[in-house]
Image (spheres, rainbow, N blue to C red):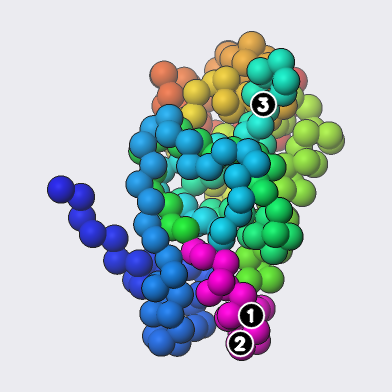
Amino acid sequence: MSTPVKIPAILTNLPMFRELSVEEIERIAQSTRAIQVARGEVLFQRGAPCTGFYVMIHGQLKLAMSSPQGIEKVVELLGPGHSFGEAVMFLDKPFPVYAQALTDSLVLHIHKSVIFEGIDSDPVFSRNMLAGLSVRLHRLIKSVESFTLRSSAQRVIGYLLQDLEEITEGQDVKISLLANKNVIASNLNITPETFSRILHNLSDNGLIEVKGKDVRIIDIAQLRGFDE
C-alpha cells in the first residue's frame, strides 16, 4: 500500500506558495490531486483540454510531440520541482504536447479555478504565479539558446552539468542519466549517434567515465570549458 500524499505539506514547500497562509494552502489543497504515473504511462495527450497545471514531486516526465511521420520530438524533460501547463492554462488552449512518464512518477494537478480565485483576491499569490512563469520562461529560453548558439558538444556538457551550476570545481561528481539516450538526444536536438559519440569523446579526453546510465565527472572545471 502506498503512503498517502500530504498535499498541504507539499504545497507549502513549493516556491510559488511559500508566502501563503495556512488557510490559503488548505483552500488550494482542496482543488489539488496527487497522480501516480507509471513508467511509460501518458499523463495527457496532445490536444487534451487543460484543466489546470502540474507540479512534479518525484520521477521524470517528458513533454513531446510527434510528426505525421511518427518522428518524436522531445520538447522538455521535467524532474522534481518543475511545474508545467501554466501558460496553456492561462491561454485556455488544449495541450500542444503530450506528457509521458520516463520513470514511476508522482505529480500534483492543481485545478485552474482555485488559481484564478487566488489571482483575483491576493496580490502575493499573483506575484508568485508570475515568478513561477518567469522561471519556466527563463528555462525555455536557455533551452532554445542551447539549440541555436551552442555546438553539439556544448549541449551535451550543458545537460550533464545542468544541476551542478553552483559547483565551479571538483572531482568525482557522479550523476545518472534518468532518460535513455534517444530521449536525451531528441531534447538536445541532436541524433542519438551524435550523443553517444560526444560521450565517447569526453571519456577519451579523460573528462568523464560512463557506465551504463551512471556518469562520473572527473573534473567539472575542465568539462565546463571543453569543446570539440
Q: Is residue 178 visible?
A: no
Q: Quadrant of the C terminus?
A: top right
Residue at the outermost right position: 149
Residue at the farthest left position? 1
Q: Which residue is mark 3?
A: 66
Of the numbered discs in the image, which one, if any, rests on residue 119?
Answer: 1
Going by the numbered disc 2, the residue's amino acid type is Asp
Q: How crowded is the residue under tag 3: few (<14 C-alpha within 10 Å), some, or many (20+)? A: few
In the displayed structure, 58 sits above or below 206; it is below
In three-dimensional space, the C-alpha distance between marks 1 and 3, rounded to whole angstroms, equals: 35 Å
Residue 122, horizontal then vertical, whole percent:
61, 87
Q: Are marks 1 and 2 in contact (CB under 8 Å)?
A: yes
Residue receiving disc 2: 122
x 83%, y 34%: residue: 148
Majority SS type along the magenta span: helix
Identified by mark 3, the residue type is Ser
The image shows residue 3, relative to residue 224, as above or below, that is below
Q: Is residue 66 magenta?
A: no
Query: In front: 154, or 4?
Result: 4
Residue 122 counted in the magenta span: yes
Find residue 226 and report its horizontal and vertical position in percent.
70, 29
Among numbered discs 1 and 3, the one appearing first in the sequence:
3
In the picture, measured across the screen, residue 106 lies left or right of residue 135, that is left
User: Could you classify mark 2 by the number of other residues whose Cα lies within 10 Å: few (under 14), some (14-19), or many (20 or more)?
Assistant: few
The residue range painted magenta reads: 110-128
Q: Is residue 27 visible?
A: yes
SS for tag 3? strand
